[in-house]
Amino acid sequence: LADMAVHLTSSPDAVMNPQFSPDGKHIAFVRNHNLIEADQVSATVLV
């Protein structure tokens, strides 16, 4: 899996508590005390 790892954000800030959505299409995580959602396929970040 390490060969398939990609960065979903360009921010140098730490990402904490990443969790996949039940359908596996999104990843939610905490950054700077904000809940962030990212589309896994397009890497679009939804704030």
Image (cartoon, helix red, strand yellow):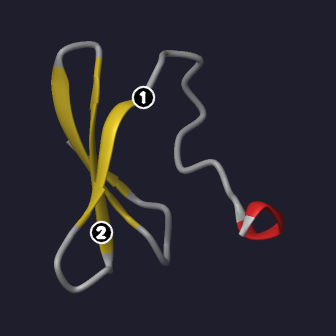
The C terminus: image quadrant: top left
Query: Which residue is label 1 attached to?
Result: 15
Q: Earlier in the sequence, mark 2 or mark 1?
A: 1
Query: Furthest residue to the bottom?
Result: 23
Residue toward you, 15 or 11 = 15
Q: Percent position (x, y) of residue 24?
A: 31, 80
Disc 1 element: loop
Disc 2 element: strand
Residue toward you, 18 or 44 = 18
Q: Percent position (x, y) of residue 32?
A: 28, 13
The N terminus: image quadrant: bottom right
Left or right of 44? Residue 2 is right
Q: In the image, which disc is placed on residue 3?
A: none
Query: In the rendered image, which quarter is residue 21 located in?
Result: bottom left
Residue at 23% x, 41% y is 36
Q: Percent position (x, y) of residue 41?
A: 49, 78
Query: Which residue is label 2 attached to?
Result: 26
3D distance between C-alphas at marks 2 and 1: 15 Å
Number of marks present in the image shown: 2
Left or right of 40? Residue 32 is left
Residues packed near mark 1 inside 10 Å, few (<14), some (14 to 19) or many (20 plus): some
Residue at 54% x, 25% y is 11
Query: In the rendered image, which quarter is residue 22 located in?
Result: bottom left
Residue at 22% x, 86% y is 23
Q: Name the kind of residue labelled 1 in the image.
A: Val
Q: Look at the picture and state if 45 lies above or below 41.
A: above
Q: Name the kind of residue labelled 2 in the image.
A: His
Residue at 30% x, 69% y is 26
Q: Look at the picture and state if 22 lies above or below 31.
A: below
